[in-house]
Image (cartoon, rainbow, N blue to C red):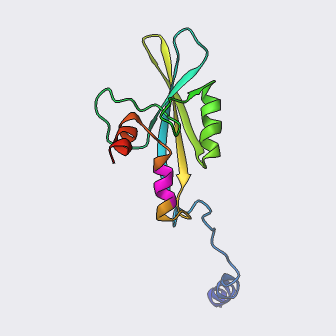
């Protein structure tokens, strides 16, 4: 009889139970990631920023950020570079520092949510990262 009562109580109260909802679900998340590398300019407090978003680069290729005219963009600090990238829609993910020959190289990982971007807007995002090769390629076309 006790088993029957316990079984009836379990069945009676089980429909009121709720499972935990996963708020960190990765379904539908689409991001582009990039890494910005900042190095201190010699005898200056300015920072030169290189960008790596997975593009194919040749050894020694210049990957510094450039404006529409092809001029290298120089930032006051990594925070200044992050503010510029944030204005372009990028979000901060992680940062770390690597010291090479007594010089700190700042690595910041950023992401851009692309699930609401059209293919044309996605091409515009990729065009934001003008490197020397892309400028030469555009001039040849």
Q: Measured from the top left, where is residue 44 in percent x and y?
A: 58, 12
Instruction: Count numbered badges in the picture.
Output: 0
Q: Which residues are magenta?
A: 121-126
Residue 30 appears in the rendering: no
Res 6 quadrant in image:
bottom right
Q: Is residue 139 above or below residue 115?
A: above
- Residue drawn at (64%, 31%) of the image: 80
Q: Is residue 118 above or below residue 39?
A: below
Observer-nearest of 108 and 85: 85
Observer-nearest of 96 and 112: 112
Residue extending farthest to the left is: 59
Q: Measured from the top left, where is residue 61 in percent x and y?
A: 34, 30
- Residue drawn at (69%, 85%) of the image: 9
Observer-nearest of 63 and 7: 63
Query: Which secondary structure class fits the magenta region best?
Result: helix
Q: Is residue 71 magenta?
A: no
Q: Is residue 123 magenta?
A: yes
Q: Measured from the top left, where is residue 17 in percent x and y?
A: 68, 77
| Horizontal arrangement in the rendering, residue 34 relative to residue 75 (left or right) | left
Q: Measured from the top left, where is residue 35 in percent x and y?
A: 48, 38
Q: Is residue 47 above or below residue 119?
A: above
- Residue drawn at (65%, 45%) of the image: 87
| Horizontal arrangement in the rendering, residue 16 relative to residue 40 (left or right) | right
- Residue drawn at (46%, 31%) of the image: 64
Residue extending farthest to the top is: 43
Residue 56 appears in the rendering: yes
Question: In what quadrant of the picture does the N terminus appear?
Answer: bottom right
């Amino acid at each position: 009889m006790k088993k029957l009562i316990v079984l009836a109580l379990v069945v009676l109260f089980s429909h009121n139970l709720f499972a935990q909802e996963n708020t960190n679900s990765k379904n539908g998340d689409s991001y582009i990631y990039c890494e910005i590398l900042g190095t201190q300019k010699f005898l200056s407090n300015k920072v030169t920023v290189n960008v790596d978003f997975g593009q194919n680069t040749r050894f020694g290729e210049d990957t510094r950020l450039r404006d529409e005219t092809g001029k290298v963009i120089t930032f006051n600090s990594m925070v200044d570079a992050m503010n510029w990238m944030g204005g372009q829609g990028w979000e901060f993910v992680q940062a770390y520092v690597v010291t090479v020959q007594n010089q700190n190289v700042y690595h910041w990982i950023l992401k851009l949510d692309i699930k609401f971007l059209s293919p044309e807007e996605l091409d515009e995002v990729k065009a934001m990262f003008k490197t020397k090769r892309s400028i030469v390629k555009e001039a040849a076309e």
